[in-house]
Amino acid sequence: MKAGEFLEHAKVHEHYYGTLRQPLIDNLKKGVDVLIDIDTQGAAAIRNCGDPFVRDALTDVFIMPPNLEELRRRLTKRGTETVQQIEARLKTAAREMKLWRDYRYTIISKSMEEDLQKFRQIMGAERILSRRLILQ
């Protein structure tokens, strides 16, 4: 696939990630909400996208832990990563947490249930914004 086929793409923690442009645009034009889980690089790329339709459709939400020690606790509790992997993630998180002001919304993560409730409230409000109405 060519770089132009992607809305954003980057190498993160030794893996390549990207969001295909056309399926995203097709779904947005149908009025379907598209949720993508991307890092701060990807979010910045979409914010700076040359396509005004995509930029206007963007609702960026930064979900972050209350602090790095809480993130360490959560990652350790999951038991899915080595100590080295956790340290690498904490280093990345410390850098990314400084960018929360770049986002339209920020959720300070408390519990999965509360985070989901806040996210649903954000999406509910965004769906009824005047600029999002597609009149036929």
Image (cartoon, rainbow, N blue to C red):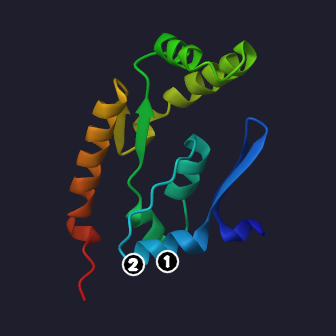
| Tag 2: amino acid | Lys
- Left/right of residue 131 with respect to residue 51 in the rendered view: left
- Left/right of residue 110 with respect to residue 12 in the rendered view: left
Q: In this view, does 122 lie above or below 116?
A: below
SS class, disc 1? helix
Q: In this view, does 115 lie above or below 48?
A: above
Tell me the crowding category of disc 2: few under 14, some 14 to 19, or many 20 or more residues within 10 angstroms, Cα based: few
Residue named by callout 1: 26
Q: Where is residue 39 in the image (x, y as percent from the top left)?
A: 58, 42
Name the residue nearer the viewer: 50 or 5.
5
Q: Position of residue 49 (x, y in %)?
A: 55, 63
Q: Where is residue 72 in the image (x, y as percent from the top left)?
A: 55, 14
| Tag 1: amino acid | Asp
Question: What residue lies at 59% left-to-right and 69% top-to-bottom?
Answer: 21
Residue named by callout 2: 30
Tell me the crowding category of disc 1: few under 14, some 14 to 19, or many 20 or more residues within 10 angstroms, Cα based: few
Q: Can you say which quadrant of the picture contains the N terminus?
A: bottom right
Question: What residue lies at 31% left-to-right and 43% top-to-bottom?
Answer: 119
